[in-house]
């Protein structure tokens, strides 16, 4: 198992601080789900729709699954939490690819390269552009607030990366790892979602430059 995959394995197994939904329990369970309709079916259908550029409508999702809407909400929590799980399922392998792209870079340069590559890939994804353009308020809430599972897990992944680089002597973190990870994620969000925050074009390369300046 590579260092990148080990990092993400630990992150994907991290328990959330709040009570888990049935979907979250099944996504991170050690045993496979039952073959009948399940929270994972709802997740997979929602993910398929999101990748196809469709808006996730909870009522329609329930109908297609043959469920009452209240059952769907009990399974996944809220639409925002379901969207968060869908987004993390896409972000996790993208982050793993970004770490591979960083190659043999070490310390702050490895982190900066990974951030820049991840943001470029996210910005270029058609489904993300559709989501940001058609549902900007929802997107910012699901992606960038403290209730976001995507932000929380992104911070955890970044913290593990910082701790790895520090442990091998390639980085002297200027802040505690968790605080530094949170700051890097906020920098990333600021440059990636700038078009819906300030109206300017997204600038992944500027995020990389900012992270380099922070960690040099």
Image (tube, rainbow, N blue to C red):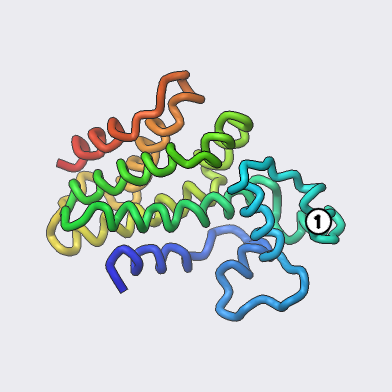
The number of discs equals 1
Callout 1 environment at 10 Å: few (<14), some (14 to 19), or many (20+)? few
What SS does tag 1 mark?
helix
Residue in the image at 58% along x and 54% along y: 85
Q: Which of the 4 image quarters holds residue 188?
A: top left
Q: Nearer the viewer, residue 100 or 207?
A: 100
What residue did someone put label 1 on? 64
Q: Is residue 112 above or below residue 26?
A: above
59 to the left or right of 21: right
Residue 44 placement (x, y as % from top left): 65, 60
Rendered-image quadrant of the N terminus: bottom left
Q: Residue at x 78, y 57 (%)?
A: 72
Vertical side of 13 occupied by 192: above or below: above
Nearer to me, 7 or 171: 7
Q: Is residue 9 above or below residue 130?
A: below
Most extreme residue toward the top, as rendered? 199
Taking the spot 67% from the left edge, 76% from the top edge, the residue there is 33
Q: Is residue 171 above or below residue 120?
A: below
Q: Position of residue 58 (x, y in %)?
A: 76, 47
Q: Position of residue 29 (x, y in %)?
A: 58, 74
The residue nearer to you, when weighing 154 against 146, is: 154
Horizontal side, residue 86 vs residue 161: left or right:
right
Q: What residue do we see at 54% from left, 59% from top?
A: 17
Give the side of residue 40 with respect to residue 178, left or right. right
Within the image, what quadrant is residue 116 found in? top left
Q: Is residue 7 visible?
A: yes
Rendering coords of residue 55 (x, y %)? 68, 41
Residue 179 shows in the view: no
Is residue 156 toward the left or the right of residue 78 in the image?
Answer: left
Q: Quadrant of the C terminus?
A: top left
């Amino acid at each position: 198992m590579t260092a990148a995959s080990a990092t993400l394995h630990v992150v994907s197994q991290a328990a959330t601080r709040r009570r888990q939904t049935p979907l979250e329990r099944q996504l991170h369970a050690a045993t496979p789900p039952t073959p009948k309709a399940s929270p994972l079916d709802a997740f997979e259908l929602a993910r398929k729709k999101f990748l196809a550029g469709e808006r996730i409508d909870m009522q329609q999702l329930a109908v297609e699954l043959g469920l009452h809407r209240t059952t769907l909400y009990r399974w996944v929590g809220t639409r925002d939490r379901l969207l968060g799980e869908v987004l993390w399922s896409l972000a996790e392998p993208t982050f793993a690819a970004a770490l591979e792209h960083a190659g043999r870079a070490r310390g702050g340069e490895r982190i900066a390269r990974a951030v820049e590559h991840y943001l470029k890939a996210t910005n270029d994804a058609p489904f993300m552009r559709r989501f940001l353009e058609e549902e900007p308020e929802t997107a910012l809430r699901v992606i960038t607030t403290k209730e976001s599972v995507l932000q929380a897990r992104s911070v955890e992944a970044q913290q593990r990366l910082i701790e790895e680089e520090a442990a091998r002597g390639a980085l002297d973190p200027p802040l505690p790892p968790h605080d530094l990870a949170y700051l890097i994620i906020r920098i990333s969000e600021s440059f990636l979602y700038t078009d819906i925050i300030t109206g300017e074009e997204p600038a992944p390369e500027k995020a990389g430059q900012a992270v380099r300046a922070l960690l040099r």
